[in-house]
Amino acid sequence: MNIKGIHKTSLIDFPGRISSVFFTGGCNLRCGYCHNPELACNSGCLRSYSNDEALGFIKKRRGIIDGVTISGGEPTISGNLESFIGAVKEMSVAVKIDTNGLNPAVVARLADRGLVDYVAIDIKTSPKKYDFVVGRHVDFSRVAETVGIIKNSGIEYELRTTCIPGYVTLEDFGSIGAALGRVKRYFLQQFVPDVTLDESFHDLRPYAVETLHGFRAYVATFADLCELRGV
């Protein structure tokens, strides 16, 4: 499954569970603010883990963890994703997947087969600004389709947006709400100008916390729960 990193124990990646986090290499987007550029570009300097190594790791940690988070990069472009998750589920371990939502067919299969317990979908910005933010042409309807699949599946989920000054505005959240409708959970993440794919993002000053609270108040009009992260 092109696993390029493992975080042994996390208390924050999988709500309500202690999880190990597996990072897959490669991504179908090129967001300049990406804080995992080596993963996104599938850098050859990263160690690769076989599926057997990863499954053996989970088996040894049963009793310590009760969940596995599969992040990236973008997990839905990895081969053998479904068979890997199936093997994890056979160990009675819950699975969360982080995705950019551009592969609704993959997400639909995972949901239909009962292979995921929680899905986190990154919403980059408003539909009209997506190409500008993600560095290539994107059909936002695919993201909206993924959100619809998960909303109708009964699976626990969250949406999340990194609030990048100039790239994500209050107006953008208005467009997001119009495009996706009411959602269950929406998390707004503070932008951190640290390691990024495009070094020019290092010069951006993060939004003031007061501005993020204003975003939160607006998003709460179409999300049952909206909270801030990283502030």
Image (tube, rainbow, N blue to C red):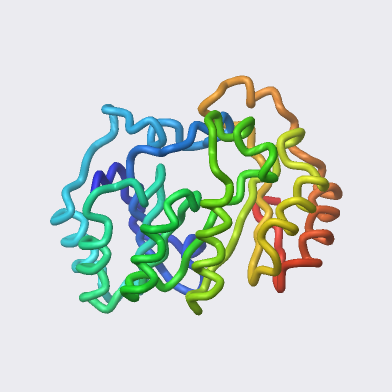
Q: Is residue 84 left or right of residue 190?
A: left
Q: Residue at x 71, y 51 (%)?
A: 231
* Location of residue 143 with respect to 168 vertically, above or below: below
Task: Decide: is 27 above or below 142.
Answer: above
Tell whether 17 sits left or right of 221.
left
Above/below status of 151 relative to 20: below
Q: Which residue sits at x=53%, y=30%?
A: 136
The x, y position of residue 127, in whole percent, is 66, 44
Quarter occupied by residue 97: bottom left
Rendering quarter of residue 117 = bottom left
Q: How many marks?
A: 0
Residue at figure coordinates x 29%, y 42% from the top left: 4
Locate residue 124, reporting x and y percent: 61, 44
Residue nearer the viewer, 187 or 126: 126
Task: State the residue at coordinates (20%, 46%).
Answer: 49
**Residue 158 drawn above or below residue 189:** below
Looking at the image, the residue that sits furthest to the left is 52
Q: Residue 142, percent across and down?
A: 52, 51
Residue 106, image quadrant: bottom left
- Residue 222 screen position, x and y as percent: 76, 67
Name the one closer to the observer, 132 or 24: 132
